[in-house]
Image (cartoon, coloured by chain):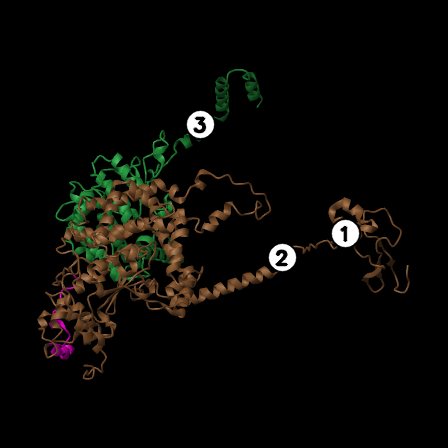
Chain colours: A green, B brown
């Protein structure tokens, strides 16, 4: 101790670097491990384990923008289609535009706007704006700016009119088929309820809320007092008929040479209605759609373009 | 017929109806020509007048399927969903009926009947420009059962109906159906139809709701249609644009007439008040407004309806006291720019782009043609007319009207509205609504019906009870799909009981004194009169004899404040001024204390 004191006292007014070197040298002289012990410790580590693998769901491409959608973990990892029509619409559109994204399974509570999908651009520390999430109503602009493919722009105002067919008639039938039709409740639980919680009371409450919300949506859209399934399915069939007429014998809607946003919107419904991997029990909507082979072919074309591996598997 | 029925006369009425239907639907003829042609041979009118509309469900399912008129709501434009069932497909038990058909009653061979599906009906065209063409059956007065009854919302803003689809439907019928064949009933009551939607067409016991459904019902069952040779593209366009109108157009109409507080207070609400019977004016318009606000929600315009009551909005800034409820002074609010703006102005930019989009979509479809699909009006023209005409209604802040006048598309559509009137496509005239439309009196609802609906509306709006009540009344998912399970009843009853208990408990709890707190009473000062109420100076004068208003008690009092076994404490209270007067300010009562201790008998 006395030696240390004298050493630090002697070095009191020399520069700090010199002081540290002298103190370490003095400490080294004091705390040198005795040679036999050092020999023992030199044998460590006895075994070095390999590094843990990353969790399966962890992203492989962190530099890609992340699209948050409703999807199962496995599907998200493979980048397969979401099971939610509005998520699938934007997922498809981004694919058509050629924007590479990674899919993150999520739910409404994660979204800043309260609705999926939303996209988080790859973060660049210099640019604060780049870290703002992109909500779904701005995804079209984002895709057009960042995608290499030229997606045909809105083809006239007819799209607005036909869009309302999808937003009302077909969406109402979809809501009924998935949320309210009793035979399909198994599918509903599998897609939306089971991922929320494994507790039975929570699942019951969530299921009840989902159903009431779907019912309220339909009633508000139809303006009626009673949800009439037959009328809804008929409305959807007429809408499919009108869409098939609008498509005609063309490959894509409204005579464009490349698929656009409207094709993605139609595909989002037709794909999910026709999807074999979803366990539909009440297949009235599917039957209504299958009466129009042009729409079925259209779905196959979009699928082949966006998910060639799935199209190959299903055919 | 019913006398000889081996089934005990259970079905004959329905069969008569079926018979009538089949006859009118004979292929190759419109129902009128056919009626005229067959009148001498079969007594159709007799049949019709004797037929009471019976629910087809009173038939066994298999037969009902073959007989009930094919409902228009099943399919609008596409081919009918099920293939035509030839008569041979009738159940075997019905041989007797078929023989009757083949026998003396009618000369129509059964092969011409198409009971279920009617693809071969041609779309008849009627003389439209004027009634110079002879309509032979008009002289043979059509019996009341043959008349189409159109139920709508009533007149407002100088228009025959306050609701766009009703306006479209009555204009369409006015154009397509000869005047004697239909009546217009301003029933103002959605509960007349099973679907609870107006407009609704009532004919032969069949209700059809909604504009498109009415149009296709008329086309498929009565050959009444105005567009011949409609291409499939036009049909698809009609469906798409009708859907667009009833979503975007309805949202804009809802904003302009219902959401906007000034228009609601000055225009729409009074209009509803004038067409509804008394207590319903309190419930029905509010319900309609709530659903209108919900319609504008997806456009992001619903928040502009925040100050629902115009009274609320104005009272906040003008008439309230300058002190808040807790006693603090309220600073006068300096009006900000946004608070002085009308909701129409707040949303102006957004609303303008929405409106212009809407108008340009319609205008591009119409192009340079007279009507949407060429030179002849189609069903879509009337629907577009209904929405555009209501958008043109002059509101206190006529935003939509300005918007239409400002944009080119809007101007062309205004010309379209004028064109519809000028070419007599719209048959009614605003100056003469009463005579240009075949109005009929609605069936009176009666006091009981009105009060019943009022009670229903009130119950639906009661918080906590409303949803259960709606479900109980059959609202929501149709019961054939969902099956009302007993658990629901149990939950409803249990919920009601729990709610009652909770309310009762809350009342009891509130009536209890607060736990653990000392009870304090604040009482007003006894002496109300006298000058001391004016503060210290007043109190000085108060002692002057001339100003003393209170009569003084003449003698002292003695109170026993404590009495134990051996101790008794008594207090003598002497009135002020009766003893020696110390210098005091008048607020101090002079108290003399006489204390007794020890034995009751021994006084100190």
For the record, the magenta segment spans B80-101
Relative to B169, does residue B403 appear above or below in the rendering? above
Q: Quadrant of residue B212?
A: bottom left
Residue on which the image places disc 2: B515
Relative to A131, does residue B136 appear above or below in the rendering? below
Q: Position of residue A220 (x, y in %)?
A: 33, 55
Q: Secondary structure at mark 2?
A: loop
Alpha carbon separation for disc pair 2 and 3: 76 Å
Residue on which the image places disc 3: A35
Residue drawn 70% across the image and 54% down it: B524
Label 2 vs label 3, nearer the camera:
2
Q: Is residue B92 magenta?
A: yes
Q: Position of residue B389 (x, y in %)?
A: 29, 51
Q: Answer whether residue B417 is visible to the viewer in this image.
A: yes
Alpha carbon separation for disc pair 1 and 3: 107 Å
Residue drawn 15% across the image and 43% down it: A255
Give the number of the disc on residue B530.
1
Label 1 vs label 2, nearer the camera:
1
């Amino acid at each position: 101790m006395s030696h240390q004191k004298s050493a630090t006292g002697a070095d009191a007014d020399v520069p700090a670097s010199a002081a540290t070197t002298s103190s370490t040298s003095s400490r080294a002289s004091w705390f040198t491990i005795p040679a036999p012990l050092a020999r023992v410790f030199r044998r460590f580590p006895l075994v070095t384990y390999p590094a843990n693998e990353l969790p399966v769901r962890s992203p492989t491409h962190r530099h890609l923008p992340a699209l948050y959608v409703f999807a199962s973990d496995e599907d998200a990892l493979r980048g397969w289609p979401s099971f939610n029509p509005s998520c699938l619409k934007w997922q498809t559109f981004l694919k058509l535009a050629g924007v590479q994204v990674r899919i993150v399974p999520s739910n409404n509570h994660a979204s800043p706007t309260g609705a999926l999908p939303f996209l988080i651009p790859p973060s660049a520390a210099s640019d604060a704006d780049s870290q703002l999430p992109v909500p779904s109503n701005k995804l079209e602009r984002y895709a057009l700016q960042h995608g290499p493919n030229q997606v045909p722009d809105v083809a006239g105002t007819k799209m607005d009119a036909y869009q309302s067919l999808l937003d009302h008639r077909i969406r109402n039938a979809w809501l009924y088929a998935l949320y309210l039709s009793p035979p399909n409740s198994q599918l509903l639980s599998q897609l939306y309820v089971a991922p929320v919680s494994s507790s039975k009371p929570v699942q019951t409450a969530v299921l009840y809320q989902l159903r009431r919300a779907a019912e309220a949506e339909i009633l508000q859209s139809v303006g009626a007092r009673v949800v009439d399934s037959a009328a809804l399915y008929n409305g959807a069939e007429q809408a499919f008929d009108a869409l098939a007429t609008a498509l005609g014998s063309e490959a894509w809607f409204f005579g464009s040479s490349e698929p656009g946003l409207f094709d993605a919107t139609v595909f989002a419904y037709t794909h999910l209605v026709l999807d074999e991997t979803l366990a539909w029990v009440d297949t009235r909507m599917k039957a209504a759609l299958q009466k129009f082979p042009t729409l079925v072919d259209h779905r196959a074309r979009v699928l082949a373009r966006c998910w060639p591996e799935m199209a190959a598997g299903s055919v | 017929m019913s006398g000889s029925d081996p089934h005990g006369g259970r079905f004959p009425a329905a069969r008569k109806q079926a018979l009538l239907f089949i006859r009118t639907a004979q292929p190759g003829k419109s129902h009128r020509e056919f009626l005229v042609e067959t009148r001498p041979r079969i007594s159709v009118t007799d049949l019709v007048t004797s037929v009471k509309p019976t629910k087809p469900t009173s038939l066994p399912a298999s037969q009902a399927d073959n007989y009930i008129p094919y409902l228009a709501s099943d399919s609008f434009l596409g081919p009918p969903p099920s293939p035509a069932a030839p008569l041979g497909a009738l159940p075997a038990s019905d041989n007797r009926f078929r023989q009757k058909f083949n026998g003396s009653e009618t000369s129509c061979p059964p092969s011409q009947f198409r009971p279920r599906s009617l693809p071969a009906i041609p779309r008849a065209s009627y003389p439209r420009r004027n009634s110079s063409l002879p309509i032979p059956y008009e002289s043979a007065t059509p019996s009341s059962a043959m008349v189409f009854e159109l139920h709508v919302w009533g007149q407002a803003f100088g228009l025959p109906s306050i609701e766009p689809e009703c306006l479209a439907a009555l204009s369409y019928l006015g154009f397509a159906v000869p005047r004697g064949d239909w009546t217009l009933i301003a029933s103002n009551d959605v509960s007349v139809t099973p679907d609870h939607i107006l407009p609704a067409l009532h004919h032969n016991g069949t209700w059809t709701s909604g504009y498109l459904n009415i149009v296709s019902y008329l086309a498929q069952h009565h050959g009444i249609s105005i567009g011949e040779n409609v291409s499939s593209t036009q049909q698809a366009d009609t469906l798409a644009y009708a859907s667009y109108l009833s979503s975007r157009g309805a949202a804009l109409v809802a904003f302009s007439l219902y959401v906007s507080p000034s228009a609601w207070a000055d225009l729409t609400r009074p209009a509803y008040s004038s067409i509804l019977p008394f207590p319903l004016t309190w419930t029905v318009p509010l319900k309609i407004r709530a659903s209108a606000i919900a319609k504008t929600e997806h456009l992001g315009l619903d928040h502009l309806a925040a100050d629902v009551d115009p009274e609320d909005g104005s009272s906040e800034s003008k008439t309230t006291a300058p002190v808040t409820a807790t006693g603090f002074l309220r600073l006068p609010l300096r009006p900000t720019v946004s608070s002085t703006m009308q909701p129409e102005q707040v949303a102006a930019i957004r609303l303008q782009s929405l409106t212009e989009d809407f108008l340009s979509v319609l205008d591009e479809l119409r192009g340079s043609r007279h009507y949407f699909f060429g030179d002849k009006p189609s069903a879509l023209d009337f629907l577009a007319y209904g929405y555009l005409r209501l958008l043109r209604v002059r509101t206190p802040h006529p935003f939509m009207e300005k918007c239409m006048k400002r944009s080119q598309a809007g101007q062309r559509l205004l010309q379209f509205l004028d064109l519809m009137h000028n070419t007599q496509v719209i048959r009614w005239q605003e100056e003469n609504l009463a005579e240009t439309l075949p109005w009929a009196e609605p069936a009176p609802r009666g006091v009981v019906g009105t009060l019943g609906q009022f009670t229903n509306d009130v119950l639906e709006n009661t918080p906590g009870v409303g949803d259960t009540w709606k479900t109980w009344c059959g609202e929501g998912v149709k019961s054939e799909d969902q099956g009302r399970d007993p658990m629901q009843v149990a939950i409803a009853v249990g919920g009601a009981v729990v709610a009652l208990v909770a309310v009762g408990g809350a009342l009891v709890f509130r009536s209890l004194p607060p736990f653990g707190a000392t009870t304090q009473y604040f009482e007003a000062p006894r002496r109300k009169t006298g000058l001391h109420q004016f503060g210290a100076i007043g109190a000085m004068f108060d002692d002057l004899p001339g100003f003393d208003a209170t009569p003084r008690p003449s003698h002292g009092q003695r109170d026993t404040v404590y009495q134990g076994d051996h101790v008794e404490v008594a207090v003598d209270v002497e009135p002020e001024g009766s003893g020696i007067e110390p210098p005091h300010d008048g607020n101090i009562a002079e108290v003399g204390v006489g204390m007794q201790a020890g034995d009751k008998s021994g006084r100190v």
